[in-house]
Amino acid sequence: MWLLIVFSLYAVTLSILLARAGHRAQPAAASRGEAAVPDRLLIVGATGGTGRQLVAQALERGYRVTALARRPADLDLEHPRLSVVRGDVLDAASLAAATEGQDAVLCALGHRRFFYPTHILSRGTANLLASMAKHQVRRVVVETALGIGSSAGRMGLYYTLFTIPVILPWYFADKARQEQVVAASDADWVIVRPGVLTHGEKRGDCRHGLAVGSFLRTVRISRADVASFMLDQLTSNAYLRTAPGVCNR
């Protein structure tokens, strides 16, 4: 019994720490209308689940896309408006080269180093923002997750009390740092916080906003719908400099 009590205290404490460490999203200021429509997009994390959807859907929407990948061969896609370049978010020089000439950036960084401390997401994003500032690229949309900052606990009870504290504590701690790096930047940023990601098809009926999620049930959303929502943020100021959650209805 005492082990259960200790573990429960640990899980609750971790949730509180993630709430404090991540961005405390506030309602966006009055919308300044639609954003300028970009032409050239850099997609970081292009070989991940959401990244692949971002690449495919961006091409469908007519953008010219540069996909950054540590192993370009992993992105098995060819298109006349797609350039796949080798790069690493921890290598500032490769990021700077990929960022030059872009109009906007979509960041869907992720990794599978779950069981020990890591700073890949936060340091990689800091490098990305520095490259954007150098080349005067303003707009960036960054994928993180529900369960951080003002959305702490909103992934659902199972994730709050088991999955995050047992499997993903270091990963979510780095995501929280990543959010703080983004929020401290001068870029025109939007942080997108999805629920549990699935491989489902795009449904186009996602719920979004600052109070999205559930403290009880696990909320989910397909990577395809996350990608679609992220792309929408390139041309809208509705969530400029804030952090909406997204999940399927």
Image: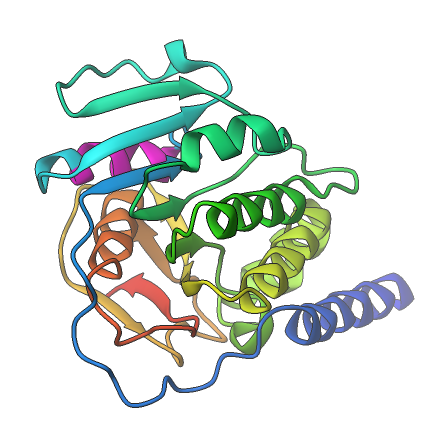
Instruction: Out of 229 and 153, give the one closest to the viewer.
Output: 229
Residue positioned 50% across, 52% down in the render: 133
Main SS of the magenta segment?
A: helix
Tell me the quarter of the image containing the N terminus. bottom right
Q: Find out whether residue 209 is within the magenta segment.
A: no
Q: Position of residue 3 (x, y in %)?
A: 88, 61
Residue at horizontal 58 percent and vertical 67 percent from the top: 148
Rendered position, 16 above or below 92: below
Q: Tell me the quadrant of the picture where the C terminus can be found.
A: bottom left
x%, y% of residue 197?
Answer: 39, 47
Residue stretch in magenta: 49-58
Q: Nearer the viewer, residue 15 or 32?
A: 32
Q: What's the residue at 9%, 38% (across, down)?
A: 62
Q: Is residue 152 left or right of residue 167?
A: left
* Residue 55 is a magenta residue: yes
Question: Residue 221 appears at what percent x and percent y?
Answer: 31, 54
